[in-house]
Amino acid sequence: MKEYLPKLLLIILLPVLVSSCGQSGPIVEEVDDSAFQRGRSFLKVGKDEEALDEFLSVTRRTINCPKSHLEVGRLFLTLKSRKDPISAIYHFRRFLLLEKDSREAPKVEQLIVSAEREIIRDLPGEPYSDYLDSLALRDENVKLTREVSDLRARLGLPLGGNSLPAVNSIRGPVKSPVAKPPVPVQTKPKPSARARSYKVKQGDSLYAISRKLYGDSSYIDLIYQANRQSLPSKNSLKLGQTLLIPPLPTSP
């Protein structure tokens, strides 16, 4: 457990280190820096390790280089051969310090949460499971903040506000939902307790008659047996023919 204490202390002290850290060197526009341009070129062809080295060289020589800090943080978090979530957090915080009003800020905050999770998961025995739960809540808050920012941008509203206009002012008056008429419940017809007659209609079959009169199509044989004298087969129904419909047998 002792070997993990330096990591935890570094997480706590990172904001202080970031805010007090300064770099010396000539003032150069980041996008004009040849190392920055090489880093972007390496990223396009999938050479992430080479890109990481180029972006790191920019951060060591240039004070105002938020884009390079952001790329370094992402690569330290995703590049398996150079994975270093602690360094990733440092560079993410440098980006936020230099670009605090950037629209990328909510995404970077979420990346910091991911990096903190990586560090905590490496600790033996998961002693900080409660802290991981709090990170999950923070992660959700970051996502919601980002969604609100995106929505404000789509609506043409200032990004600095914390509230959205009322729904009615965006979409107009809310219409009350129209009540749907109740669906009638179909009930099975109660079969008669006595024999009765039925006149065959257009489109009738023993299957349809059984379903219509008994509420069940499985009594075809019962109707057929009761009308054997007038029905040579189950498919020999004639329009206008009168059938005897026997009562259902009672259970013992």
Image (cartoon, helix red, strand yellow):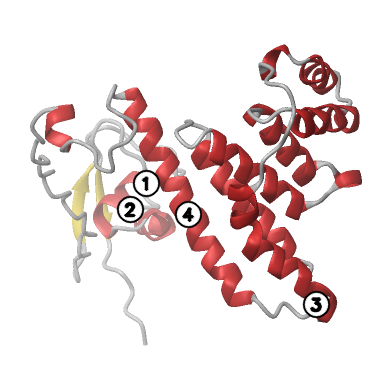
Circle 4 sits on which residue? 140
In this view, the residue in front, 210 or 14, is 14
N-term-proximal mark, 4 vs 3:
3
N-term-proximal mark, 1 vs 3:
3
Mark linked to residue 124: 3
Q: Residue at x 37, y 46 (%)?
A: 206
Task: Tell me the SS state at disc 4.
Answer: helix
N-term-proximal mark, 2 vs 3:
3
Of tags 1 and 4, the one toward the viewer is 4
Relative side of 180 to 133, left or right: left
94, above or below 169, in the image:
below
* Residue count near mark 3 (Cα–Cα under 10 Å), binned few <14, some 14–19, many ≥20: few
Q: Amino acid at mark 2?
A: Ser
- In this rendering, the count of numbered labels is 4
**Inter-mark Cα distance, 4 to 3:** 26 Å
* Residue count near mark 2 (Cα–Cα under 10 Å), binned few <14, some 14–19, many ≥20: many
Q: Amino acid at mark 4?
A: Glu
N-term-proximal mark, 2 vs 4:
4
N-term-proximal mark, 1 vs 4:
4
Residue 44 percent across, percent down from the top left: 80, 18
Of tags 4 and 3, the one toward the viewer is 3
Mark linked to residue 210: 2
Residue 95 percent across, percent down from the top left: 60, 37
In this view, the residue in front, 25 or 157, is 25
Quarter of the image for residue 101 reads top left
**Inter-mark Cα distance, 2 to 4:** 60 Å
**Inter-mark Cα distance, 1 to 2:** 6 Å
Q: Residue at x 66, y 28 (%)?
A: 65
Task: Tell me the SS state at disc 3.
Answer: loop
Q: Residue at x 27, y 26 (%)?
A: 157
Circle 1 sits on which residue? 206
